[in-house]
Image (cartoon, helix red, strand yellow):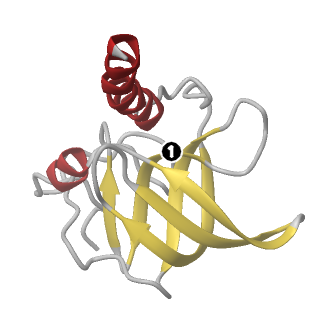
Amino acid sequence: MKKFAISAACVPVVLLWAAVAVAHHSAAQFDFSKRVTIEGVVKEFNVENPHTYAVVSVTDEKGTRDVQYEGHSASNFYRAGFTRGSVKAGDKIAILIAPRHDGGDGGFIQAFTVNGVTVGFAGLSPSTGKPEDKDTGSSAPGPAPK
């Protein structure tokens, strides 16, 4: 009976450990040496921890489908210039991603432009894949003034 009690007490600990192990994963599946710009319509955009994710309706040579992208933590998005409510379902979006190594759908969000506002990490522009011009007069990464 004592062995059963000890085993029963261990089960929740093992399950909790397994949940934590599955919840956090690496970005090893993404090729950060490449940059690809994806354009589509936002279906869902959730800036949350541990990783932000976006579901975008994409149309290309494979047809139209919903593709999920992941990105940095919420705090990184806010520091990069994201504001709550700035991306909504139905918005047209351009996302600069690090694509998957296996060539499958999805990728890691490097920057995005929606409703004329650019949010970039490491100052990357979704339109060029290159660093934004630092002389825009703004502390947040974004398109140069017109």
Residue 19 placement, left or right of 146: right
Q: Residue at x 20, y 72 (%)?
A: 84
Residue 8 placement, left or right of 79: right
Identify the residue under disc 1: 129
Which x, y percent locates residue 77?
A: 25, 52
As drawn, 129 above or below 78: above
| Of residues 38 and 106, the one drawn nearer to the viewer in this rendering | 106
Query: Residue 8, located in which quarter of the rendered image?
Result: top left
As drawn, 99 above or below 135: above
Which x, y percent locates residue 3?
A: 38, 11
The local secondary structure at tag 1 comes to: loop
Instruction: Give the number of callouts.
Output: 1
Q: Residue furthest top?
A: 3
How would you rate the neighbour count of disc 1 (Cα within 10 Å): few for under 14, some for 14-19, many for 20 or more?
some
| Of residues 94 and 21, the one drawn nearer to the viewer in this rendering | 21
Q: Amino acid at mark 1?
A: Gly
Quadrant of the snapshot with the C terminus: bottom left
Quadrant of the snapshot with the N terminus: top left
Q: Residue furthest front?
A: 1
Q: Residue at x 79, y 39 (%)?
A: 103
Q: Residue at x 24, y 51 (%)?
A: 74
Which x, y percent locates residue 27?
A: 50, 29
| Of residues 44 and 98, the one drawn nearer to the viewer in this rendering | 44
Residue 17 placement, left or right of 27: left
Q: Residue furthest bottom?
A: 90
Which x, y percent locates residue 92?
A: 51, 80
Query: Residue 113, located in which quarter of the rendered image?
Result: bottom left
